[in-house]
Amino acid sequence: MRRLIYSLTILAIFFAMALTVQAKDDPESNLPLTREASFVESYSPTEWMIKASGIGMGKKKYEEDRATEDARRCAVYFCLYLGTDPILSDQQEKSRFSLIEEDFFKLSNINKYISWESTELTSRVKINGGKDLKIEKVFRVNVGLLRADLVGLGVIIGLPDLAAEIGLPQLMVLPEVKKGENPLEVMEKRSEIKHAARAIESYLTAKRYEVIVPQQQDFLNNYGETMRLVESTSDDMSHRMALAIGSDVYITYAVSIESRYVGSTQQKKASVSVRAYETTTARLLGTETGYSYERPSPDEVVVEEAIKDAIDKVLSRVTAYWKDDLQRGIQYKILFSITGSFSKDQGEDIQFAVADVLKSFTNRSKENVVTDKTMDYLVWVKPGKYAQARDLYRDIKDGFAAEFAGAKVKSQQLNRKLLMLEIAN
């Protein structure tokens, strides 16, 4: 009996030791032990280059493998949560992901998002008194596949779902110019500026965004009158063009190329600043600067490389802005001009009637500027009800006729983001 008890005691001790070793070798959580990572560059429209660290614990012969596995988790964790433009961009998405987080970070799942891994370590140090190993290396993470899987799991809204709800934003790309300069003329004069626009447009179309190209001849033939109408709205030519065309967001960029000789070889390096603006208000949505490597290449090559380094981050903010519009409603800028002959009291009644009409069928309205002859509004409306500016104009016209009998609303110009309306006798 004593021998049996002794044997059971020894087995229990060995079992406890085995559990301790297992706990040391296999962390209780699948989440990365270290959350230290940084963005290196946007390698392509679907891949990010990430430098990530990882910690290896347990048996010495396995510690580097475990540290590498932890670094892979850390690289994916960075894409989801960290940096300036994480995939999980709001609290609702993070809450939904928290329900599947542990299973998602199983190594068998994480490995499929690592499209490339450096064979060299950028750092390798012993920590915790030499017990554990911490490494750092570079990975390429397939964020396109990562986003697609999160859409399939119902964690985030995919671009097709977003497009089904309110359509994808229409984007326009123009160079950043000095006050008074015409962006189209600048593009025609400088080949690297024109190439930069094409590179950004190519990147956007690869992401399935709808891109308006302002150089198209049909636009050049018809936008002159609209540009005259919006002349008073802004000193910024790019903003006026975006309003005239009707893009939801306009993107500007500035290109700088530096060159020097190394021996007899000319080396070039480009930097490109990219900014995205909300068309209706000219509000800045995001700005980033990208850099190319210094290399003996033509201007177009280094410019395109710098653009890839900047555009993806800005585009993430555009998508986040568009998701907000899904909650608030589609945004329109409405400019009323009172051209008829009205008394001061009638003019005030017209302003009251316009305000009441807009409140009656919009999610939200904001009065920007009101004078005796003009009214400037921003309104947010239901996407499904007002898919086109003409639908919104019809309700404004009918609603105003019911509110004020002595005048009527006429259309001067309608496009996707701007309604220019006239109130006449």
Image (cartoon, rainbow, N blue to C red):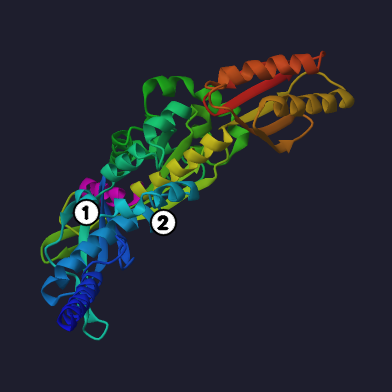
Which kind of residue does numbered mark 2 sit on? Thr
Q: Foreground: 252 or 127?
A: 127
Res. 177 in view: no
Task: State left or right for residue 246 relative to residue 147.
Answer: right
Element type at mark 2: loop
Tell me if residue 142 comes above or below residue 198 in the rendering.
below
**Badge 1 element:** strand
Q: Residue at x 40, y 43 (%)?
A: 155
Say which mark, if any, is on residue 84: 2
Magenta stretch: includes residue 355: no
In front of the other: 38 or 297 = 38
Instruction: State whether residue 299 appears in this view.
Output: yes
Residue 378 rendering spot, x and y as whole percentages: 64, 34
Q: Is residue 81 left or right of residue 49?
A: right
The quarter of the picture where the N terminus appears is bottom left
State the image quarter where residue 421 is shown: top right
Coordinates of residue 284 in the picture (x, y in percent):
51, 47
Residues under labels 2 and 1: Cα distance? 18 Å
Q: Which residues are magenta?
A: 299-311
Q: Which residue occupies the foreground of this view, 301 or 93?
A: 93
79 is higher (above) or lower (below) than 353? below
Question: x%, y% of residue 301?
Answer: 21, 48
Residue at 44%, 33% (x, y): give it: 169
Checking the image for residue 140, the label placed there is 1
Residue 126 versus residue 96 in the image, above or below: below
Closer to the chain start, of discs 2 and 1, is: 2
